[in-house]
Amino acid sequence: MKKYILPLMLLAITACGAKAQDNAGSAAQPEQVIAVADRVAAPDFTLNDINGKPLSLSDLKGKWVILDFWGSWCPWCIKGFPALKEAYKQYDGKVEVLGIDCGDTEEVWKASVAKHELPWLQVYNPKGSDLTARYGIQGFPTKFIIDPEGRVANVTVGEDPAFFEVLNSLVK
């Protein structure tokens, strides 16, 4: 039952007035932000990093974490990389970014990480994994801000500059 809490919560948020997102990456609506009082534990997972070593979300507990669900096939994901790189530099040591590849082969994923010079942690989400379902992913990119206690503080679907305003307000 616990694995369905986050997707159900996201569905409830969407049903309460947030615009449904499509894979075109349109801007997320403010209603999609989970209120601080509603924070739920982010589902833990373990996937292999770019070097083939297992990396768990729980390994990052104690830090602010941005989970970036993306794919090389998603133009809005690629469009958002420069702003995410700026945030990564700005919050160096305060925020860890974890890119989660979705829908690519391992070879294409590794080539895309190299091509776009993504400096943060990256993990490969293989076909058959239930991670996107467990997180209720409905569109790409989807970014989650996870607080140092491992709870979801924000969800943004689509490429939305307001995501960084929310990040700034949370990570003071």
Image (cartoon, rainbow, N blue to C red):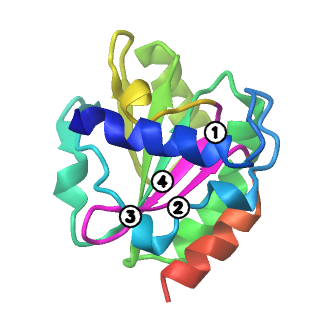
Identify the residue under disc 1: 141
Camera-side residue of 45 and 78: 45
Image: 19 above or below 50:
below
Q: CA distance from mark 4 to mark 2?
A: 28 Å
Magenta span: 139-158
Q: Amino acid at mark 1?
A: Pro
Q: Magenta span has 20?
A: no
Q: Amino acid at mark 3?
A: Arg
Camera-side residue of 110 and 74: 74
**Sequence-first disc among 1 and 3:** 3
Circle 2/circle 3 CB separation < 8 Å: yes
Q: Tag 4: Cα neighbours inside 10 Å, few (<14), some, or many (≥20)? A: some
Q: CA distance from mark 4 to mark 1?
A: 18 Å
Q: Amino acid at mark 2?
A: Ile
Q: Secondary structure at mark 1?
A: loop
Of the residues tagged 1 and 2, which is closer to the observer? 2
Q: What mark, if any, has residue 39 been given in the picture?
A: 3
Q: Position of residue 7 (x, y in %)?
A: 44, 36
Q: Image point 50% across, 24% down: which residue?
A: 102
Camera-side residue of 132 and 8: 8
Q: Image point 37% across, 25% down: which residue?
A: 125
Q: CA distance from mark 1 to mark 2?
A: 17 Å
Q: Magenta span has 142?
A: yes
Q: Position of residue 150 (x, y in %)?
A: 27, 62
Q: Secondary structure at mark 4?
A: loop
Q: Is residue 164 left or right of residue 96?
A: right
Q: Secondary structure at mark 2?
A: loop
Identify the residue under disc 4: 119
